[in-house]
Image (cartoon, coloured by chain):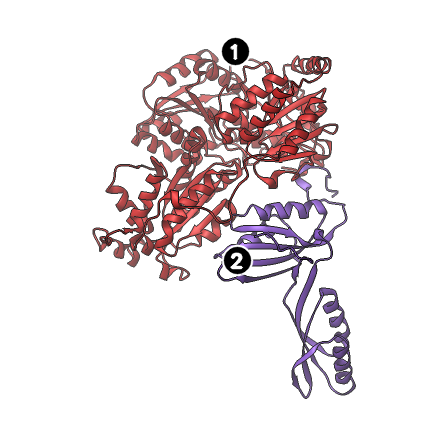
Amino acid sequence: MRQPTGSAYFMEEHHEPVTPHTLAILVDNEPGVLARVIGLFSGRGYNIDSLTVSEVSHEGHLSRITVVTTGPADVVEQIKTQLDRLVPVHSVLDLTLTGRALERELMLIKVKGKGEMRVEALRIAEAFRARVIDATVESFVFELTGKPDKLDQFILLMTPLGLIEVARTGVAAMARGSEAMEG
Amino acid sequence: MDQNVIDDDAEAVAPHILPEAPAGEMTGAEIVIRALADQGVEHIFGYPGGAVLPIYDALFQQTEIEHILVRHEQGATHMAEGYARSTGKPGVVLVTSGPGATNAVTGLTDALMDSIPLVCITGQVPTHLIGSDAFQECDTVGITRPCTKHNYLVKDVNDLAQVLHEAFLVATSGRPGPVVVDIPKDIQFASGKYVRKENVRHKTYHPRLNGDPDKIRAAIEILRGARKPIFYTGGGVINSGPEASRLLREFADMTGVPVTSTLMGLGAYPAASDQWLGMLGMHGTYEANNAMHDCDVMLCVGARFDDRITGRLDAFSPGSRKIHIDIDPAQINKNVRVEVGIVGDVAHVLAEMVRIWKASKAQIDPAGMADWWRRINSWRARDCLRYRRSETTIKPQHAVERIYELTKGPNTYVTTEVGQHQMWAAQYFRFEEPNRWMTSGGLGTMGYGMPAAIGVQKAHPEALVIDIAGEASIQMCIQELSTAVQYNLPIKVFILNNEYMGMVRQWQQLLHGGRYSHSYSESLPDFVKLAEAYGVKGLRCDKPADLDATIKAMVEHDGPVLVDCLVDKMENCFPMIPSGRAHNEMILGEVSEETIGKAISDEGKMLV
């Protein structure tokens, strides 16, 4: 059945272009704060493409959460204001709007293979400046840091060469320039 | 075997008195009482249980705070809501762990949706038992996280006072809402330092009160150029305090702009004013909705463009420039894009607008306004709240009109349950002052009205407090009649009994071919006898001729009264914007059965 459009009940029916946005969220490092942030995303039907969290100031009791989300501009704006009003949230910054923000992700990737495949895997790893951090006679574990699309590309190339396991950290991001994110 | 005879309770019984706290310290339970007293709390609504016994013991040994014992924790939360809504002060709830906390969830969600300041203290199993599936354990902070503005689990008694003061700060400031403080039993017994509320500052939470001056000026400029302006006001005006209502009146007066309001905002602007258009939205008036649709400038004050207000979004007030004042930044541009969004407290922003308007001697084009009022008056001439009168059966609208005529005055407070009777109360009872109207708007909680009336009555012992109810809703919290009797609270419950869950039945008639699936109130109790069983005076009325005498008897009786008023069973609530339609596509009363059947399109039937 065709869904009615333009009604208040189908606000999700967006036809605007969706783009990925990277949000940096400074929060008080208190129990449950991550659950609040994640609960807001699930409760309001927003996407989480990746999420990282870690304490960034022990004395200041601050954690930084980096969320990559996808949505139309107005939904992302809504996500930002909804996050901002959570009580333990200090500030929220949409890094995608600040210009070419710095984004890095770390990946561990295990490749199993022999002979030509193994040599080829090592050769590509070198080209990507991936480090070998574990090796057996028939496997490697590579460590690779970079932008998410570089990591995607590496996975793509390793897949036919015996890729058996991937662990990724999600994106850590920061704005360029001399300004710090306000706390 | 009695399931309650278990270790945890046994442990609670063993120390007959609370352990003495060392000098300069207090027990956690004493800290709770002290913090509440410091916050100016006079009444709390609660229900004891194993995990809050130390707090109840501390309550027993003091006289500053009066505790009202409820019959179900949901009742406690609604009482606290009624108390808060009618006073502007926070409502305070005290319940035990597990079922005590889960029963409070409905009221907490209701308070979140309607921005009501509540502080709910929940007991929790001792810290070392958390996570062990202990008796009456539940993850209270986990369960209440999405239905509170904020919540806390206190794990150190030295944090307790700070957390409680923070809870009051968060609940009452910014956009108000419910806050839960979960206190494990061992923390209630432990001794720690008390911190006074003056010493508490919040690290991250600083809601903004003053609006951006540039945006306020921009809003004034837009308003000044209007020819067909409207003020669309909401519960935010009430929450901002009496000064906000006063300023709204002043601003409307000096600009001459027509005013409409959401369900939550009724009373902020006086119904007696010539500029009052009545409520807007799904069951709003013809003039209010048409004016919203056709206006050229809309000033939204403390409302949130809820779906009951906007109807079909892409047809919502298509030609207007919109200005939105809200203390919650997340409400701006949420459902409807606005040209100017002013984040700030309604009273602060309106004061600034009034000041600028006065200083600049601004005026809206008189010719344009005269024309606008002519159109509004032509819509008013439709008399959209007209209904077919009857000599033989009581029309529910007529009953509300008579209640209004016989009880109106600044000392009358009205609460409602949820459904048709709620909409009739909103349409036919006229409010002149803020804080006189308590209803469950956002969540639509059946069972809200009677406990809310108890809370209102506790806050205003001399007031006339009427719960306009339905026979289905009232049964959801009927046990609280016992609370009204225990505390001698003379609330008046007026049931518009049509033997149906009326709004469900109306939608089934409109949307589902009149197949009244499970909406008939089968096996109704004899409400008069039920009232008498509780020690409440019961009255019944089934003839229009007896209506006035019954209402008078209800008001004059010195004590709680329940009236079972038998009304027309098939009456529908009109006017109505059918789901999926625009503001200018209303159906009015007195339409044919055929029109009613076709009122809602197939697409509209998908909506709620």
Q: Nearer the viewer, residue B555 or B113?
A: B113
Can residue B545 be seen here? The reply is: yes
Can residue B586 be seen here? The reply is: no
Q: Colour of chain B?
A: red
Disc 1 from disc 2: Cα separation: 71 Å
The circle on residue B391 is 1
Give me the chain that's purple.
A
Given the image, what chain letter belongs to the residue carrying mark 1? B
Q: Residue at x 26, y 51 (%)?
A: B24
The circle on residue A62 is 2
Q: Amino acid at mark 1?
A: Glu
- Is A61 on the left or on the right of B101, as rendered? right
- Give the answer, above or below, for where B170 lies relative to B286: below
Percent position (x, y) of residue B527? Answer: 39, 27
Q: Secondary structure at mark 1?
A: loop
Percent position (x, y) of residue B493? Answer: 41, 25
Q: Nearer the viewer, residue B264 or B170?
A: B170
- Give the answer, above or below, for where B61 lies relative to B513: below
Quadrant of the frame with the C terminus of chain B: top right
Percent position (x, y) of residue A135? Answer: 66, 84
- Is A53 on the left or on the right of B469, as rendered? right
Spot the residue most to the left. B16
Q: Image quadrant of residue B553?
A: top left
Q: Residues within 10 Å of mark 2 (few under 14, many from 20)?
A: many
